[in-house]
Amino acid sequence: MDNTAVACRRHVPRRVFHEPAWTEKRDGHWQFAKRLLHECALGKQIRLTRLCTDSREANNFARFALFKADTYAQYAADCKFDIKTPITLAKKLGASNYASAREFARTHHRACVVYILEPIEFVQGHGARAAVRRIEPSPSFILQFGKPADTVITPDHCLGRILPVGRKMTRPSTLSMTDRNGAPHECVAEAFDTTHNVIILLYPVKALGKPTIILPPGFRKVV
């Protein structure tokens, strides 16, 4: 590392290099720190102190670098609309399953919401439950259903039977959800246990679009 990079490193807050949140291989924080040093070495005029002090701006920068602007959204739009897609894209882009699942929902053009839960625990007399760590809805989901405010998923919750108890995944299952106008919608939910978290993808059936029937050449309607 040359003197320029060393000098710039002195202006980067200590927490960037030593706080656990930055040293964990999660959400690309370490890549973010290395990117800052690289920018310094190139001699670009970046206000590092302000950038690192403002955590929101720093997180947005890390997200932009990790998911390569809108590259992730483009990949997701071209992939199958299911719980496996954010898991697959996490490996492809070197992100955590947690970060990938959030990005999948907040950038998808279809109505969907991702629940990220803490590991499932068992409460005597009540059964399985999981605390909600984060809820990430897509923009179109918020317009149609609003943003869910659940704090825990229990057996009597509509998503209770979706919890992957004793298994890695829960296959797509249908359930009903009411929109902001009080109208019911048939929805599909599926889950994946990453060990560290449980990820649930929920979306209205209409988000998948209507099935297309392709008729063979010369087909004639029988009256």
Image (tube, helix red, strand yellow):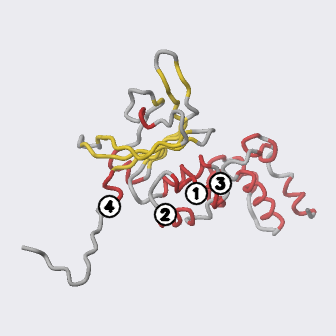
* Residue visible at 78% across and 43% down in the picture: 15
Pointer 4 or 3: first along the chain: 3
Image quarter hosting the C terminus: bottom left
Residue at horizontal 79%, vertical 46%?
13
Q: Residue 221: percent from the left, percent from the top?
A: 13, 76
User: Going from the N terminus, do you reach mark 1 or mark 3 first?
Assistant: 1
Query: Position of 145 compared to 191: left or right?
Result: left
Tell me the kind of residue under disc 3. Answer: Ala
Q: Residues within 10 Å of mark 3 (few under 14, many from 20)?
A: many
Whichever of labels 2 and 3 marks the residue nearer the N terminus, that label is: 2
**Whole-percent x, y for residue 194 in the image:** 60, 43
Callout 2: few (<14), some (14-19), or many (20+) C-alpha neighbours within 10 Å? some
Does label 4 or label 2 sit earlier along the sequence? 2
Cα distance between the residues tagged 4 and 2? 15 Å
Of residues 184 and 148, which is closer to you in this image?
184
Distance CA(mark 4)–CA(mark 3): 29 Å
Between the residue at mark 2 and the residue at mark 1, the CA separation in whole angstroms equals 10 Å
Residue type marked 1: Thr
Q: In the rendered structure, are the residues bearing label 2 and label 1 in contact, judged by CB atoms less than 8 Å apart?
A: yes
Three-letter residue code for mark 4: Gly
Residue topped by disc 1: 88
Dots 4, 2 in contact, CB < 8 A? no
Distance between mark 2 and mark 3 Cα atoms:
17 Å
Which-is-in-front pick, marks 1 and 3?
Answer: 1
The answer to which of marks 2 and 1 sits earlier in the sequence is 2
The label shown at residue 209 is 4
Q: Which mark's residue is nearer the viewer, 2 or 3?
A: 2
Q: Secondary structure at mark 2?
A: loop
Position of 71 with respect to 146 (left or right) is right
Q: Which residue is mark 3?
A: 95
* Image spot of residue 174 (x, y percent): 34, 44
